[in-house]
Amino acid sequence: MSDDPTHRRYDLRSSPTTAYSKDVVSANGEAGAGWLGRFAGSFSGHARPLVMAVLYGLAGAAAALGFRFAVSAVYDNGIAPLAAMQPLHMLLVSFAVVMSTSLISGILVTRYCPEAAGSGIPQVKAAFWQKGGFVPLRLLVVKFCAGALSIGGGASLGREGPSVQLAGAAATNLAGAAGAAPDDRRAALAAGAASGLAAAFNTPISAITFVLEEVIEDLNNAAYLSQALLAAVVATLVTHMVVGAAPAFIIPAVDDFSPRVYLAAPLVGAVAAAVGVLFQVLTLEWRDWIRKKSKVPAWLRPAVGGFFTWTLGVSVLLSVGHLGVFSLGYGDLEETLHGNMPWQIALLLLGAKLLATAAAYSWGGCGGIFAPVLFLGASAGMTCAGLLDMWIPLSKSDTIVLVVVGMSTCLGAVVRAPITSMLIVFEMTHHFAIVPVLMLGTMVSQAVARRLVKENFYTDVLARDGIHVDKMIPPRSLADWHMRHAATVANLRPELVTSLAPDALRAVLERSHHQYYPLMREGTCIGILPRAEARRLADAAPALGETASPPPEPALLPAVTIHADATIREAGILLLKSPSGMLVMLDYGTSTRFAGVITLHDLVHGEIRAADGLPAREGS
């Protein structure tokens, strides 16, 4: 199977569900004509996607669980024993472990697969919308090795985001082996991502809502639901067989919490949201500064983040005896969820964990933010509960509920997926009674987060990297479609006429059959050249032996211009007035730089693709 995403095929009649056919595979020369392609092609049309969804779930579970065990193995043999060591020995061993694993991780990512850095969820989202679901196989290998070393070695990052990316990569490459083209793997990527999160947290329902809410950004999207649902169920069953059916976090029974919790939950939600926003802004602004100003080579940057983590981690360990700053911090998180963490220590861990995670991520570490954000939210909830207890007596059950509210609301503020943030905490704890309190805290946290920052963490990461997913996601309604930027449907690489020399005109006419061509002079479109006029000029060349005469002046049609940030509705109105049926698109704002053209064909083609749930422009 070719890994080159530029070899694309498009069929506007096809559904978003990948088709696997032996005939299609063979016609495209894909490796899927092998046993897996024949296996997928042996099932009927309706059964085939479901069979592949089962395979995606198995592959996703294998990737996520394998990664989980790898992270644990590195952690258990490096960071975990530190608490029992003598201070000097602990300092030396911890420094060696954190710095060596961060350094090796940085070398692996920089040299072999730069897109393996970071959480993995923004990359999954970009691959889904920008590359048709294509994820290269090398990412699976590099992310697994670098992530296990980085997270297990102590970097303050999480394994859940990488698990989503790893499972998605496994599923999309499985789809490729079965014959799917690189641009036809969205269903596989969505199913794999759902199976990865389901296996990572043992939370199948929230795994599905997360894919719909965050990756696809449409809870009503049914095109990918069936395969994602089945893959998540399969991954959960595998997880139950391998590690058991127990929830990710076990907390005491809290059914007897008092009504005071309902008064405190909005405050906790607001504080946790503010903590999440602070984390997002600090991390991404620091990341931008490093990319623009830092002279540290890329391969060494994760080690710098590792040094920050080591400094903060050993400081907390020496002062209060807690390892929570390192790696996932699940040990201290469990203690907080049982209500056994003093609020003063929770506040200390909150500040240290926030700085350590911001440093690890911004300096290019290979790991996610799910676990750290849950840790931050729990610590914020415990701190608020401890302070409130000075004025309003709170029981232990009250405190635990507020800790859980902090987890849910901080996660919801950062990823901006409120339904997922409630469901995932509910599924991780298996306590139904806390759901109304979670809903109350979530409403407040969403209001605070949306007031303070415009985008969620993942979308903000992509936007700062120049990837604007909102321009690729199909519209939800005709009115929404008409308000999209004209650049959404434009042809950015049109056939241009840059010379009126007969040979140049003949070459243009031979390689294309358009009726109109923008005539360019010094990078500016001076008019539209009709095909008939181009043919007349090409045939006006002097015969052999004749005296050359000045080339005739072309009869041009006026160029009707539109800026890239005008709406599609405005483009449609201008097209009706354009004598050539073509618009010359200029760059954004008030720029006069030529950026592409828009024709009626582009407009209709984009609308058909949008109706089919695809990006309006092929290759987007």
Image (tube, helix red, strand yellow):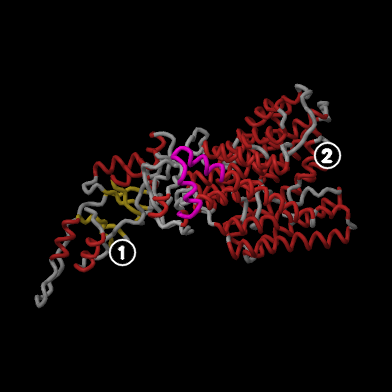
In this view, 378 is above or below 260: below
Q: Nearer the viewer, residue 489 or 584?
A: 489
Identify the residue at the far bottom of this view: 545
Q: Nearer the viewer, residue 79 or 547?
A: 79
Helix, strand or loop under label 2: loop
Q: Give the class, few, some or many, for how many residues have Cα within 10 Å of label 1's Cα (few <14, many ≥20).
A: few
Amino acid under label 1?
Glu
Mark 1 and mark 2: Cα distance apart in space: 69 Å
Circle number at residue 522:
1
Q: Is 346 above or below relative to 80?
A: above
Name the residue located 51 percent from the left edge and 41 percent from the top edge: 216
Give the labeled residue for mark 2.
341
Nearer to me, 515 or 355: 515
Which residue does the image show at 21% across and 47% down from the upper left?
A: 579
**How far across and down, in percent of the image, does residue 228 sit?**
55, 39
> Crowdedness of circle 2 by 10 Å Cα count: few (<14), some, many (20+)?
some
Q: Is residue 434 left or right of residue 498?
A: right
Horizontal relation, residue 598 to residue 311: left or right = left
Identify the residue at the far top of this view: 259
Range shown magenta:
33-55
Residue type at mark 2: give it: Met
The spot of residue 54 in percent (x, y) is: 56, 42
Q: Nearer the viewer, mark 1 or mark 2?
A: 2
Q: Nearer the viewer, residue 556 or 67?
A: 67
- Is residue 196 covered in magenta? no
- On the image, the x and y values in percent for residue 472 come to 45, 45
Q: Quadrant of residue 606?
A: top left
- Quadrant of the rendered structure where residue 436 is? top right
